[in-house]
Image: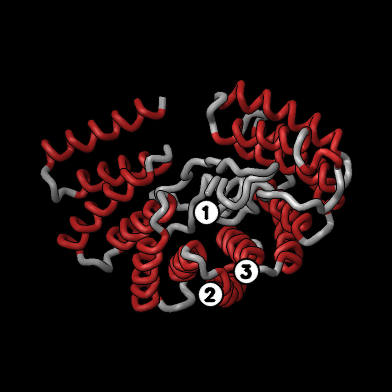
Amino acid sequence: MAEGRIEKLNEKAEAALRELGPDHPGTLDARAEWARALGEEGRTAEAAAAFGELVAEYTRLLGAQHPDALLARHNQAFCLGVSGNAVTAEALARDVAADYVTLLGADDPETLNARAAWARWIGETGDAGAAVRILAPVVDSCVDVLGPVHADTLANRHLHAHWVGRSGDVAGAASLFADIAGESEQVLGAEHPDTLTARHDYAVWTGESGDAARARDVLRSLVPDAVRALGAGHPDTLVMRHNLAHWTGEAGDAGTARALLESLSADSERILGAEHPEAVNSRRALDWWTWGPKAGGKPGAEDAGGPKGPGGPDGGKSAAKTKDKSASKAKNAAEAQTGDRADDQTDDQAEDQAGANAA
């Protein structure tokens, strides 16, 4: 179905090119729609190339700082980053953010989202501390300009909390996510996808900060909500079930962890296929708790791996929002790890499925 949609959009773009010419706005819009579809279906390297071609056309016709050119530049950076080229994504996103500052001012909502996107790729290049330093004033400005529970503010608070954790302040990340989850629940409801993501990431960072029992309890209440809201086979639900098993084991109940992982492994293979990274990872986790160092169920025992990535740009689902023209929803693909957990990059490039705030 996805391939059929992409093919139809490609045919639409080619028809517009023939009938309207390469410079017509309808042709450019059709090409952008096709590029977005590629990104949404996980073909991010192809999407990045398509957006790069659009950037050249928009720049030639309208100038590099025209809104359509800026959006294409943002999406090119996003798709490059999600496809693994964080260094180039950071450089492109930096220039996009600078142009927004020049055009709209530092505190315009579009500028704030562009600055947040730049911070994400700085973090992905390895400098989590710099990401935190850029995101902190972005969050403050979002609160002042938009309010604390505006969708963009919540998304950027989520991104900031993620990089706080990645920078080493796991307790700080847990505290920030507790606030985000609580406020998201009040505004959006307990079963809204963004609330589910925030609750998940609160649990994971709480566990990472040393409170495995609390992480288990939060996830135990979260999973049924995710099943109702998303479905039992949704990739984010599978991530949450994986982490419930992990923190159940870390809290001292290896037997229940094994039972949860047996069910998860069977469902992952049935839904995703035996060779899907999530299915492989859940089998490895089951082995880890059955035969490996975790089999004794000792809390805090050393392991090689980590829980399925805390959210933000990488968690079970990306927290950052995209506007309707943005290349969002990069596919969630949990990386197989040696131990019972999958470290950051499910887009946490699940996330997530990982989107970023669209300029």
Residue drawn at (75%, 58%), measured in percent from left and top? 208
- Between marks 3 and 2, how big is the CA–CA gap? 9 Å
Residues packed near mark 2 inside 10 Å, few (<14), some (14 to 19) or many (20 plus): some
Kind of residue indicated by mark 2: Ala
Q: Secondary structure at mark 2?
A: helix
Q: Is residue 54 left or right of residue 330?
A: left
Q: Secondary structure at mark 1?
A: loop
Q: Secondary structure at mark 3?
A: loop
Residues packed near mark 1 inside 10 Å, few (<14), some (14 to 19) or many (20 plus): many
Kind of residue indicated by mark 1: Lys
Which residue has dot 1 on it? 321
Q: Earlier in the sequence, mark 3 or mark 2?
A: 2
Point out which mark residue 167 bears.
3
Which residue has dot 2 on it? 130
Seen from the viewer's position, the closer of residues 83 and 149 is 83
Residue drawn at (78%, 55%), measured in percent from left and top? 207
Kind of residue indicated by mark 3: Ser
Image coordinates of residue 194 in percent, x first then y, are: 63, 49
Of the two numbered discs 1 and 3 in the rendering, the one whose residue sits closer to the viewer: 3
